[in-house]
Image: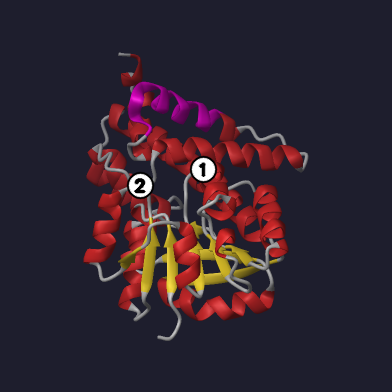
Amino acid sequence: MSETLGMIGVGKMGLALSRTMIEDGYPVIGYDTDPGRLRMLEEAGGKRAASAKEIAEAADIVFSILLKPEHIEENTFGSRGIVAAGKKELILVEMSTMDPAWHSDLADRLAAAGIQMLDAPISGSHPRVASRTISIMVGGKQEVFERVRPILEPLTQGVVYTGERGTGATMKVVTNLFVNSCVALLAETILVGERAGISHDKMMECLQSGSVRGTMLDQIGPRLMERDFEARGAVEIFVKDMGLAIELARKHGVELQIVPAARKMFQRAEAAGWGGDDASRVIEVYEGKDRK
């Protein structure tokens, strides 16, 4: 592989993506504020950088996956950000889940600095990266997408070009609207079944053979039943993403009912100190354990 890839943010998802890119033969250079994450990148065969600017200087295509807008802002326009490298025609693939309008504005500002950006958020948790069963939705210029497509396609079970800038981010928010609410609904389903005396085995057998069957049940159902709260998708991320969904709907004249109700349960989990736990922890909110 001739192109060097950069990864800004070597958290759980960023590290998983980096490992898979390295498996595919790409040189990967990463940056993170956590030295431990950078050591794991090096153990996987990648190289560490001291800043996003250093990544931009070394890489042909840069990927970014961060939690907050201010983190992205710092690593793009800060004194040690990618723009400071002064490298024209660099491509930034921004994979963070953010407000679509914010993503579009970021793309415009980067274009003014000579950097092409794609908004390319991921559907699927970090354990699914290794099995290459995530999906990626991509907004931006078609020709830039075609340049990056050969890198993305082997990582996933599907890459969809959604259109102009911001549309990938929009589709991710719409996807999360469904996914996040489903976790709360499955928690309700399983808890009621438990309280009514149905065993987990019988519950899963019936749900998987009926109209509830599907990816969400298969992935989330066992974690809820086993009270497995090791983070794949953290409570605090659900709270953020559901807030994005509510705001997007409001902008387009839709008053959501289910998402705000579900979000309140995740907010209770966050307030109980469970923000870093898996979203399956919401079942303990339904059990009232957050009040104890």
**Residue 220: mark in rendering:** 2
Classify mark 1: helix, strand or loop: loop
Label located before the other in sequence (1 or 2):
1
Residue toward you, 51 or 11: 51
Whole-percent x, y for residue 60 in the image: 50, 75
Q: Callout 2, which amino acid?
A: Ile
Residue 270 in the magenta stretch? The answer is yes
For image coordinates 30% across by 48% down, the residue present is 204
Q: Compare residues 239 and 223 and report the one nearer the observer.
A: 239
Name the spot of residue 65 as percent of width and height, x first. 47, 55
Could you say where residue 18 lies in the image, as x and y percent from the top left? 36, 66
Extreme bottom residue here? Answer: 2
In the image, residue 100 sits, relative to residue 198, either above or below, namely below
- Quarter of the view holding residue 164: bottom right
The residue at the point 41 percent across, 32 percent down is: 188
Q: Distance of mark 1 from mark 2, alpha carbons?
A: 25 Å
For mark 1, what is the residue? Answer: 68
Task: Please tell me whether residue 102 is drawn above or below residue 281 in the rendered image.
Answer: below
Magenta residue check for 271: yes
**Amino acid at pointer 1:** Lys
Total count of labels: 2
In this figure, which colouring scheme has been used for the structure?
Answer: secondary structure
The percent position of residue 48, horizontal first and vertical second, equals: 33, 63
Identify the element where label 2 is drawn. Answer: helix
> Which residue is at a point 54% across and 51% down the rendered structure image?
79
Viewer-proximal residue among 123 and 178: 123
Q: Can residue 89 be seen in this view?
A: yes
**Where does the N terminus fall, quadrant-wise?**
bottom left
In magenta, the rendered stretch is 261-275
As drawn, the label of residue 23 is none
